Image (tube, helix red, strand yellow):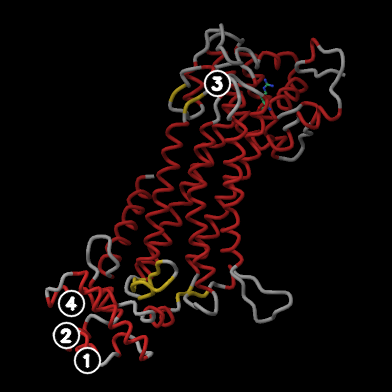
Amino acid sequence: MSNRMWGGRFAEGPDAIMEEINASIDYDRKLYRQDIEGSKAHVRMLAAREIVAVEDAEKIAHGLDTIRSEIEAGEFTFSRALEDIHMNVESRLAELIGPAAGRLHTARSRNDQVATDFRIWVRDTLDTLDAQFADLIGALAERAEQHAGDVMPGFTHLQSAQPVTFGHHLMAYVEMFARDRSRMRDARKRMNECPLGSAALAGTSFPIDREMTAAALGFDRPTANSLDAVSDRDFIIEALGAASIASMHLSRMAEEIVIWCSAQFGFVTLSDKFSTGSSIMPQKKNPDAAELVRAKTGRIYGSLTALLVMMKGLPLAYSKDMQEDKEQAFDGLPSLSLALAAMTGMVRDLTPNTKAMKAAAGSGYSTATDLADWLVRVLGMPFREAHHVTGRAVAVAVERGVVLHKLPLAELQAIEPRITQDIYTVLSVDKSVRSRTSYGGTSPVNVRKQARRWLKALEREAARD
Ligand code: ARG
């Protein structure tokens, strides 16, 4: 049997494989709510413009509500023969209300319909993600304020570089996630235009009111070009692009948590709630949540790549290739959402082992720069020379097997006679971090200020909403 929604010119039904490759209902049923809202807005507009009779529009809107309840109650039978969510809903509407259902698709095509449904889904998902970013940023800033004065090693090349504070390290991620959040907000702003009324590709001859449907569906305005509106999927690509960058940040942080949890580092302990055990090694407590956050990055990049490649050769306007956009979005954005939730949970729950961090902060001659800076500040030595003198002091310390601040004054004076006892005041890790008061630096005062600034901003935002 040919398709009852579009089969007028067809004598035969589709091959089984055709149905298999063509049907999207297994995944686009997720759009039922957006589809029904879009259809209701459309039919109300048709009635307002006297394109369909008010009684028919009411019947249609009522029927659509019934369908929504059926789907939510699990009583709706989805059919692959009806391809997608749009035709499943419309076909059921005909069963429920009879021929009036056939008026719903006036001045509309599945092309503008799917573009509208999908934009609403992406927009709503971006809003959920926005709240999740705020949550994560808040959790990080709170922990940073608590640990603004706790010293840990700062690394470059994963080698001890200079002491920093744990709070400062967490605040670095606050900055990254805040940029991620603003990228998502930008994407949302750009995408919030309504394709409905673009019809198949060229617009329609019916006197529709696109401002009305756009406003009813929460869009800022209708899209300005019908071809563009049904052809482009840059809005989801942009969202996945921003999601990819965010997941890269999440993955770096997850990787650090994995490293910090190892016995060799021992900088943090993850709560039992975010760890798992091993079925063979009873002693194990594995940072699985962090590992999975790291792993989700692959799926999110995968979604972005799949869509970029799928879109790149398509002529205007709609091509069926574009049906493949949804599964990627439905995987990529929820993966980010899950990763954000897991990361926020870990940040709230983890226990920093401040003693272990501090001990490690002093290793690796991490205050060598402070020694060099002292030579510059107190003796007026050019930095390059001070660097050289300090290098020699480090070499002696390495040879003796002692940390810098345990090197006897006589040894230091053998290298540079003008060095005095005062040098020891800058060689401790606490002094080192406290001295780094330049804007953006690691000093506890700075970190506390930054953490409070973010927490205040979040509070103000919450009060506004
Ligand atoms: N299921 C389709 C999709 O997701 C809906 C649009 C179909 N349009 C068409 N001209 N066949 O892309």
Find out whether the residues at labels 2 and 4 contact each other: C-beta distance under 8 Å. Answer: yes
On whether ligand 1 comes within 8 Å of the CB at mark 4, the answer is: no
Q: Look at 72% across and 23% down and name the residue there.
A: 93
Q: Viewer-proximal residue, 54 or 19?
A: 19
Q: Which callout, 3 or 4, points at the residue further toward the start of the chain?
A: 3
Relative to 275, is 89 above or below?
above
The local secondary structure at tag 1 comes to: helix
- Residue type for callout 4: Leu
Q: Quadrant of the C terminus?
A: top left
Relative to 136, is 445 above or below?
below
Location of residue 177 in the rendering, given as x and y in whole percent from the top left corner: 42, 53
On whether ligand 1 comes within 8 Å of the CB at mark 3, the answer is: no
Q: Which residue is mark 2?
A: 419
Q: Which residue is mark 4?
A: 375
Q: Which residue is mark 1?
A: 409
The numbered dot on residue 23 is none
Q: Which callout, 2 or 1, points at the residue further toward the start of the chain?
A: 1
Crowd class of label 3 (few under 14; some 14 to 19; many from 20; radius 10 Å): many
Q: Which residue is mark 3?
A: 196
Q: Which of the 4 quarters of the picture holds residue 89?
A: top right
Ligand 1 image position (quadrant):
top right
Find out whether the residues at labels 2 and 1 contact each other: C-beta distance under 8 Å. Answer: yes
- Residue type for callout 1: Leu
- Residue type for callout 2: Ile
Crowd class of label 1 (few under 14; some 14 to 19; many from 20; radius 10 Å): some
Location of residue 393 in the rendering, given as x and y in whole percent from the top left corner: 28, 83
Relative to 434, is 184 above or below?
above
Q: Viewer-proximal residue, 463 or 124?
A: 124
Q: Which callout, 1 or 3, points at the residue further toward the start of the chain?
A: 3
Crowd class of label 2 (few under 14; some 14 to 19; many from 20; radius 10 Å): some
Distance Cα–Cα, label 1 vs label 4: 14 Å
